[in-house]
Image: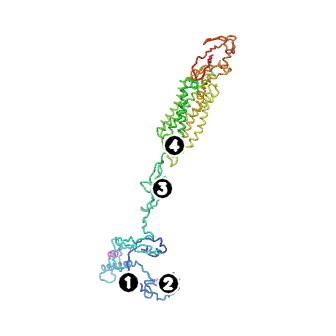
Amino acid sequence: MWSARSLVSSGNEAEVEGTLSVQPQANPVRGFDDYFLSLTVDNNKRNPWFVEYWEDHFRCRYANSSRTPYNGGYTRQCTGTEKLTTSNTQFEAQLQFVSDAVMAFGYAFRDMHQDLCGSKPGLCPEMSPIHGDILLSYLRKVVFTGLSGDNFRFDRQGDGPARYNIIHFKQTSPGRYNWVTVGQYVEGTLKLNTSALQFRLEKSAAPSSVCSLPCLTGQARKYVEGESCCWHCFNCSTYQIVSAVDPTQCVTCEWGTLPSPDHLHCNPIPEVYIRPDSWWAIGAMLFSSVGVVMTSVVVWVFITHNDTPVVRASGRELSYVLLSGVFLCYAITFIFVLKPSAVVCGVQRFGLGFCFAVVYSALLTKTNRISRIFNAGKRTTKRPSFISPRSQLCICFCTVSVQVVVTVVWWVVSPPTAIHHYLVREDNFLVCAASINASYMIAFAYPIGLIIVCTIYAVLTRKIPEAFNESKYIGFTMYTTCIIWLAFVPIYFSTANNVELRITTTSVTISLSATVALVCLFTPKLYIILLHPERNVRQSMMPAAKYSAIKNNLSSSSQRVDSGTQSEVIFPLDYELHEKLRSMGGCLAHPRPTSATQTCPPTCCLPDHHCGATVTLTPSTDNTATNGPMQVVPDVQL
């Protein structure tokens, strides 16, 4: 009821503009205006505060009036001729309620007096004292027409008539504001003139009238304590969405998903894995394809020249095993670029170690055989065991089978599977489970051991006779391989956040290792077979030993040893030594049959410590056609 007072809107017009307020409906009290305007200080002495009102209203001080906090500043004397008029006096609009309240009590007392006292004047004993409960019962029953002309009565709840004016504070013209009645509510009936509403002078649209506006999309609510219609809106964090069940809660998205732009759904992050059409995969596959072609060329050359001395001297069976391992090393790249799955991961596990096990098992068998042959030659004349082609293949197979057993046990203990790997929330790498930690080292452990052993054998056999200098190339292969893998290990663990780079690095490293073995071990042989076929003869494969070396070794070891893969690779005598022996008298002076046995006579010119030995000179009958001329070189057995 105070909203229409000037003290509410004065000075705050811009803020109050557009306000709708409810004010009790009150009509003027008939006769009150005339009565009040006729009052003066002289005729209203019954009201002790009327003098103060007069002084404040006319800004003067009445003669002989008491000093108050308000009239102390007035210097002008009141003359008594001042007069209240409608132009200088504003009446309270709610006077009807005062008169209705007074009249309600009057009618209640009247009715109570009639019932309790009858026609007796004044208060009868029944009304002395007056009981409030009894008076209240009479108040609830009063019905009358007030001084404003409105009917008055109390309802069942004890309230007066529900009559209200709906008032609106609006700007009627620029800079001019007024309270305007735009409707009324009378005992349950609302009447509102919406066309008269104006919330801003320039904008007539009604503002939203709610405690809290709906939250924006992706915002959650936090209700004001004790309120069900008022809330604060807040944003969910970067990786959260608004709960579909409870709009007051934010739910964190699972790993591998990110919130949608409106923070209402968790969308899966696209899987990241190396794809065959990516540049990383294309580069790795191109390198491997070149390696496959190179390996195929080497295999074709070896098959075409399968029975030539160079191929036989290189150990045909182990060479083909070695080439198979090299081919697998190149082929494993094409498995690495496939989309990870349980099958692909299982093949990767097996192939990763198996291809290396095949390569280095063959190399280990080669170096071990060479080492045993020459170490045995220093100690005894007995031929070393397990140096035949079949024995070498069995040794190689057993060595490779260790890797197969390790891989099978690994499969059983930890079955291969593809998983999603998350380095940060935005990542969703699809990788094989073994690739995210050091598990792949299980596949590499045994081949690394083979590499180390092969390297040791390569060092131990580096000074064997030149005829068996393949150990030199094996040694160079192992040294280079060790350098490659020493560089690979830190690169592998430092590229954990880049799946494509890690897989490409692994593939290229495997292909590099295969390339080193292919180039270092087979290039010298291809050079002779393709570019210098005249050297692809037995004598070229077994250069003559120095006379002094033959002299020192004739009595210590058999000169005929099976090289394993070639049939009958022999330590021949130096051709010069043969000619010297032919020119000497005595033991070689007379013609001999193809195979003859002769004991050195007393005049034998061989060294004394060789006398007594039986010398059998057997001219070679192996005149198998080769790519170059064959020389008849005698085999010497002591």
Residue 278, numbered label: 4
In this picture, residue 494 sits left or right of residue 417: right
Residue 367 position within the rendered picture, expressed as x and y whole percent measured from the top left? 59, 28
Q: Quadrant of the N terminus?
A: bottom left
Label 2 vs 3, first from the N-terminus:
2
Q: Earlier in the sequence, mark 1 or mark 3?
A: 1
Q: Main secondary structure of the magenta part?
A: helix
User: In which image quadrant can residue 136 be found?
Assistant: bottom left
The residues tagged by marks 2 and 3 sit, at their Cα atoms, a distance apart of 64 Å
Q: Mark 2 or 4 closer to N-term?
A: 2
Region in magenta: 135-141
- Disc 2: CA contacts within 10 A as few (<14), some (14-19) or many (>=20): some
Residue 334 placement (x, y as % from top left): 50, 37
Instruction: Say if 225 sits above or below 9 in the image.
Output: above
- Residue behind mark 2: 59
Give the quadrant of residue 523. Answer: top right
Looking at the rendered structure, the secondary structure element under dot 1 is loop
Q: Which residue is mark 1?
A: 31
Q: CA distance from mark 1 to mark 3?
A: 67 Å
| Labels 2 and 1: the sequence-earlier one | 1
* Mark in the foreground, 1 or 3: 3
Q: Find numbered disc 3 in the image and state the secondary structure of the residue it sits on.
A: loop
Q: Mark 4 against mark 3, which lies toward the viewer?
A: 4
Q: CA distance from mark 4 to mark 3?
A: 37 Å
Q: CA distance from mark 4 to mark 1?
A: 100 Å
In the picture of the structure, the residue carrying the numbered disc 3 is 236
Q: Which residue type does callout 1 highlight?
A: Gly
Check disc 2 and give the amino acid type. Arg
- 368 to 133, vertically: above or below: above
Mark 2 or 4: in front is 4
Is residue 278 in sight in this rendering? yes
